[in-house]
Amino acid sequence: MQAAGKRVAMVLAKNFEDIEAIDPKNYLEGLGAEVTVIGIEAGRIEGKKGGALEADATFAEADPTAFDLLVIPGGGAPENLRIHRPAVEFTRRFVDSGKPVGAICHGAQLLISAKVLPGRTVTAVNKIGDDLINAGARYIDEPLVIDGNLITSRTPGDLPVFNEALGKALAGVPAEA
């Protein structure tokens, strides 16, 4: 599987779940993709457990049409992103484009705020299952759920299947989940 020349947008805010950002970033870069971290503001973004990533761009600078895949890690970042209108709009435009969007754990909170879940089947950490249902989604508790261009997973334990699904989507390999 190759992703050379592909561009990935990873949206982050403070308090992200370290491994849910760093692991997919490293995996996708290992496939040859260029991962751009997009933040509310430029500079260092601190994770929940001591990790950190640098924002390569802000939402004011980033154009969803310039990317092939969107990744939304979990932790506390989605809660911080969903109250930032440019982050919500970026996400809505990306989902509406039909290009693949991956969200893990609490990442689906940003999808809720972008109002892109009615009629979609997704998974996430079980703590937000009711929120997903209330947003019009069909929530199922599975390690990986693919519904059209949405790729969702529950927790860090699901990262191997999540990363593989992201890589396949980026490489244009048909989904199997």
Image (cartoon, rainbow, N blue to C red):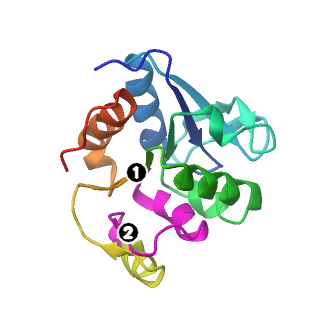
Q: Is residue 104 left or right of residue 38?
A: left
The single residue placed furthest to the front in the displayed view is: 97
Residue 176 in percent (x, y) is at 18, 45
Give me the residue at 46% from left, 30% from top.
25
The stretch of residues the image draws in magenta is: 103-126
Give me the residue at 26% from left, 48% from top.
157
Q: Is residue 57 above or below residue 102?
A: above
Residue 125 magenta-highlighted: yes
Q: Is residue 84 above or below residue 175?
A: below
4 or 143: nearer the eye?
A: 4
Dot 2 amino acid type: Arg
Q: Is residue 100 left or right of residue 140?
A: right
Q: Which mark is residue 120?
A: 2
Q: Which mark is residue 22?
A: none
Q: Residues within 10 Å of mark 2 (few under 14, many from 20)?
A: some
Q: Which residue is mark 1?
A: 149
42 or 170: nearer the eye?
A: 170
Give me the residue at 67% from left, 39% from top.
38
**Mark closest to the chain's N terminus, 2 or 1:** 2
Kind of element beneath mark 2: loop
Residue 36 in percent (x, y) is at 61, 29
Kind of element beneath mark 1: loop
